[in-house]
Image (tube, rainbow, N blue to C red):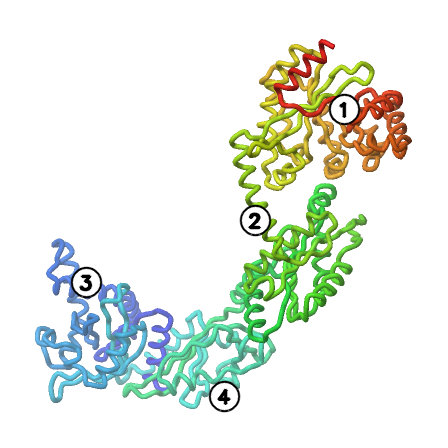
Amino acid sequence: MKPSALQSIACLCFSAMGWQVSAATQSPTILLANPMVFALVIGGVFALMAGSVVWGLNRKRGVIRSNEHHEAHHFYLEAFQANPGYQFVFSSDASLVSMSDGLTKALNKSHAALFAYNLHELLEPDSWARLAAWLEQPKNGQVVKLTLVSGHNERVTGLFELQSSEQGNLHLARYLHLSPHLGQADTDSELLAVTLSSIGDGVICCDLDSRVIFMNPVAEAVLALLTEEVKGLPITEVMPLYHEGSDRLIEDQMAVCMRNQQTVSLPDSTCFRNHLGLEFAIDDSCSPVYNNAGKVIGAVMIFQDVTESRALKRKMNHLAHHDALTGLPNRLLLQDRLIQACKRALRNRHQFAVVFMDLNKFKKINDSLGHDFGDLLLKQIAHRLTDAIRACDTVSRMGGDEFVLLLDAIEDKRHVGSVIKKVLDKVCGLYEIKGVQVQATLSAGVALYPDDGDNAEVLMKHADSAMYRAKKSGKGGMQFYCSQLDDEAEQNQVLEQAILAAISQDKFVPHFQPVVNAADGRVVQLEMLARWQREGVLVEANRFIGEIADMDALMRLQVRLWEQALSYFVKWQALHPKLRLSINLAVKTLQHDDALQTLKRCISSHGLLPQHIEIEIAEKQLSLLGAELSSVVSAWRQAGFTLAIDDFDACHTSISELHAFSFDVLKLDPRLTKGLIEGEASGVVSSVLTLANNLGVVCCAEGVETTEQARLLTEMGCPLLQGYHLGEPLCAEDIAAHLTRKSRS
């Protein structure tokens, strides 16, 4: 290989890797043979260029801020101009800013004389066209062939490397010609070969026929071959390139760069496999190599092994688009697939379905068995869902216990219904996790394209609405979207806004229903019930309490009601010392971290004690506490409150649980009271009264609406009665009058 060609290759390598080498046409021996001078030139060339550029601009603009800056600029200018090579600085309007002495001597003009020219006057027409094209889209490191002419015989022709300043308003043209002097060729070639071998990237050089003529140690290590073994072989045989994930070969890029006479970059997916079968991902570029006359004599490839970084990128991309727990597509990837499905369905005129699915009572499973158990259950459900659908369909996890199915190219609504029924049959059922069997069911809401929406956002919204309806029904199963759901959703939104406004305006007020002693009819207790004064109408709690719980505003409402009720109760208690107040609490309130302490503070602020308050918990809700039941009941009992099971019908709580948790009161379900007259429930009521008596628990019968019911319950030994026959819920003013009348009688 000729020394001059090797030098050109080195220069190109340095440029491609961001290194800058000042190429001197007059004295390359001095620059390359002396390592210290060589290092100084490399390190200082851009400092010299930057100084001269700034000095040139300041001189043209007449801006010299200080003597110190002026001295530094002058020094840099002199250093830049003293360069014997060919280089010049010009602005974006093609005005000359500075140039080297080597260039002025070659053109046989003084600096002052050359400054009178614009570059389009100094360059030959073809050269000016190439430079003008570069100025439109400047690209650092691009090599352009230019011919500068200042007279008939004074001209400079060669390849110039072009660079732009950070601001892009100044540009440097640097001549790449390296012609070693006689007697120094071997020394220079050896130095350049050593330099190429010390580069951290792989370097492969080829001749005009794309045959390998040089590889540095990095390239040899990756290919597991020595230069001597592959020298003269085609690059496509030594290093066949192909696209990652396929066997599709990539065209010989060495030949491409030589044919187009410009640097080319390979696709991001470029890979190759060496003769040992090891696969590498690479990031590389190929550049043509020119001789002194500007003729292409070969090409050089500089590449990096990016196998690890590309694998990490793939992993990060997968994590960004897939659920970490189940490995299913996440919300982001589902959104993209939904958009594509809409486009495909519009083009092919077919339908598809979006199915929103939710695991029923997952919180209960999580709370009772633990979050690790819940995670394992979700993974098994995800596996069953994946097995239940076709390969062309998608199952995605939205987060928590929510899944979404995308069923592509479906026939009609009946077909969707049968498919989802099969999916639910396969997914719902018993799961065994850590030796524990648990029953899992899902609720599903379905939206169809294009009937229920023609874009991803609307379809997801409508499928969610349908799922919410299926879940709210309490039966689970499947619900198709219909416009009625939108009306309900809108009504729910209006209701939520009205509730929030009513809470802040104290439109929710406490009412009180008396509980009487069956033996003498004395009022011994008052049950606080929430009422909503809405537009002159009194709304009962069962009309709004569920919505408030769903809004997570229940605790906020209850605190306001407690404050109002206790302010009344403390006055009545002063007149009737044995009077007690009962308060209904939902499971969400019992589980709230601050509920117990908040109620204790409210009671204390009114001068009352927890012993004056009875806490009522609905029997059906006790099961929702799961593993927390024992600790919750224990905490409230230790605080001094009396605990009652409300709406007790002996169907949800075992005798052992009644004994273990030591509840103080059992309040019979009104349906048992109603069944007394027909005789259907008399046996159950009698059994409950006997059980309560044996456990030392007080019984209170709710829903007493007739004299006959009151008589039968009294005869059966029920000590406390409550119902409209004995007193309906009243506001604070009316209940005060009621207490006064009862005390007198």
Q: Residue 689: image x %, image y %?
A: 87, 25
Q: Nearer the viewer, mark 1 or mark 2?
A: 1
Q: Earlier in the sequence, mark 3 or mark 2?
A: 3
Q: Secondary structure at mark 2?
A: helix
Relative height, residue 5 to residue 60 (above, below): below
Residue 320 visible at all = no
Q: CA–CA distance between discs 4 and 3?
A: 50 Å
N-terminal label among 1 and 2: 2
**Residue 725 location in percent, x, y?**
76, 24
Mark 3 or 1, closer to the camera: 1
Between marks 4 and 3 in the image, the one whose residue lies nearer the viewer: 3
Q: Nearer the viewer, residue 489 or 77?
A: 489
- Farthest residue to the bottom: give it: 209
Residue beneath disc 1: 725
Classify 10 Å Cα crowding around label 2: few (below 14), some (14-19), many (20 and above).
few
Name the quadrant containing residue 567.
Answer: top right
In front: 383, or 388?
Answer: 388
Q: Residue at x 49, y 88 (%)?
A: 233
Mark seen at residue 490 = 2
Tell me which corner region of the image, top left, top right, bottom left or bottom right, holds residue 80: bottom left
**What label sits on residue 54 in the rendered view?**
3
Question: Mark 1 to mark 2: distance in Å?
Answer: 39 Å
In the figure, 198 relative to 712: above or below?
below
Residue contact at pointers 3 and 1, CB within 8 angstroms: no
What label does residue 233 carry, if any?
A: 4
Task: Identify the residue shown where x is 34% and y is 82%.
Answer: 186
